Amino acid sequence: MTTSNNGTEGVEPVAPAVRAELARLRDSIDNIDAAVVHMLAERFKCTQQVGHLKAAHQLPPADPAREAHQIARLRRLAENAKLDPAFAEKLLNFIIAEVIRHHESIADNTNIVQQQQ
């Protein structure tokens, strides 16, 4: 058994082919992560517009019926993609909570502006 300072005690040396495959896979993961971030940014641009529309027409920040529909839809998509539907639901619930927080903030700011006029 070998000892090192980098947390690889007892680990056999990794073959160059394995290192190359790890690097290739990690590059793919990094690209997917970047795409996810960009897709979320686009999603939030759209939901910001929804928030402004809701605020302008005094609609509530949350829409429980739509949220339930979206959760059910995402669970089906996750199942079809062989992704844990519970994980997909948790992720969407996190995103929805952030969207509602943004909508509430937009509504609050709209109300302040309207009161000042």
Image: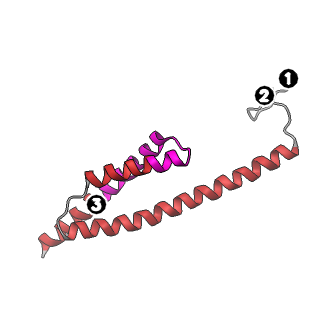
Please report whichever mark, 2 or 3, sits nearer to the chain's N-terminal start: 2
Give, as a three-letter code, the residue at label 1: Met
Which type of secondary structure does the marked residue at label 2 adopt? loop
Q: Locate residue 86 relative to residue 11 in the image: left or right.
A: left
Mark 1: few, some, or many residues within 10 Å (few <14, many ≥20)?
few
Q: Which mark is residue 111?
A: none
Give, as a three-letter code, the residue at label 3: His
Which residue is the site of mark 3? 103
Q: How far is the residue under mark 1 from the one under mark 2?
A: 7 Å
Q: How far is the residue under mark 2 from the one under mark 3?
A: 51 Å
Which residue is the site of mark 1? 1
Above or below: residue 47 compared with residue 76 = below
Q: Locate residue 22 relative to residue 89 in the image: left or right.
A: right
**What's drawn in magenta, residue-wise?**
76-103
Q: Which mark is residue 9?
A: 2
Quadrant placement of the C terminus? bottom left
Residue in the picture at 54% in, 44% down: 83
Residue in the picture at 70% in, 50% down: 26
Residue in the picture at 36% in, 64% down: 47
- Magenta region, mostly helix, strand or loop? helix
Q: Position of residue 3 (x, y in %)?
A: 82, 27
104 or 63, which lies in front? 63
Give, as a three-letter code, the residue at label 2: Glu
Q: Is residue 98 a member of the stretch shown in magenta?
A: yes
Residue mark closest to the camera, 3 vs 1: 3
